[in-house]
Amino acid sequence: MEEIEKPMYYGAKPETFEAARLLRKNMTVHEKLLWQRISNSQICGVRFRRQHPIDFFIADFYCHEARLVVEIDGEMHIFQQQYDDGRSAEMEKYFIKVIRFTNTEIENNIESVIQRIENETKIRMKSPPWGI
C-alpha cells in the first residue's frame, strides 16, 4: 500500500501532504518544545506524528493508535474559535479526539500538558471508541 493510501490519513490529498511537509520544516517554537517530549514513543509507548494530514486538515500532532490529535493554539486561535470547533467536529467523525493547548501552557506548564496527553492516550487505548 502506498503511503498516501494508508487509513491513518483519512483520504488526504497530495497537496495536503505537501503542505504538511512544509509545516514540518517550519515548526513553531512551541511545537518544537512539545515535539521533544512526545516524539520517539515517549508517551505510553505509542507514536505521535507531527504535522500529520487527516482528510483536508493538518494536525499539529497525531497518534493513530489512540486516534488522538494534539493541537497547539497560538494567539490567532482566539479569533477562529468557531473554525477550530468545526475542525474538531470533522475529526470526531473519524473517532478522533482533539485536545488543545495554548502556547502559554506549553511554555509555562509543559509537565501538566504532558500529563494530560498521557492520561488521554491511556484512556483511549484502554477503551477505544472506534471498536477495535
Image (spheres, rainbow, N blue to C red):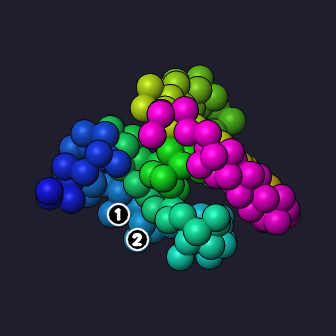
**Camera-side residue: 32 or 91?**
91
Quick one: which residue is furthest to the left in this view? 1
Which x, y percent locates residue 110?
79, 64
> For residue 127, what is the image quadrant?
top right
Evaluate if marks 1 and 2 touch, with contact meaning CB atoms under 8 Å apart.
Answer: yes
Q: Is residue 126 above or below residue 3?
A: above
Few, some or many residues within 10 Å of mark 1 (<14, 14–19, 20+):
few
Q: Is residue 72 above or below residue 107?
A: above
Residues in magenta, as a range: 106-132
Secondary structure category for the residue under label 2: helix
Number of marks present in the image shown: 2
Distance from the alpha carbon under mark 1 to that under mark 2: 5 Å
Which x, y percent locates residue 23?
41, 61
**What's the mark number on residue 22?**
1
Which x, y percent locates residue 7?
29, 45
- Which amino acid is tagged 1? Leu
Q: Is residue 94 visible?
A: yes
**Camera-side residue: 65 or 53?**
65
Residue highlighted by disc 2: 25
Q: Is residue 43 above or below residue 82?
A: below
Residue at image location 21% in from the left, 59% down from the top: 3
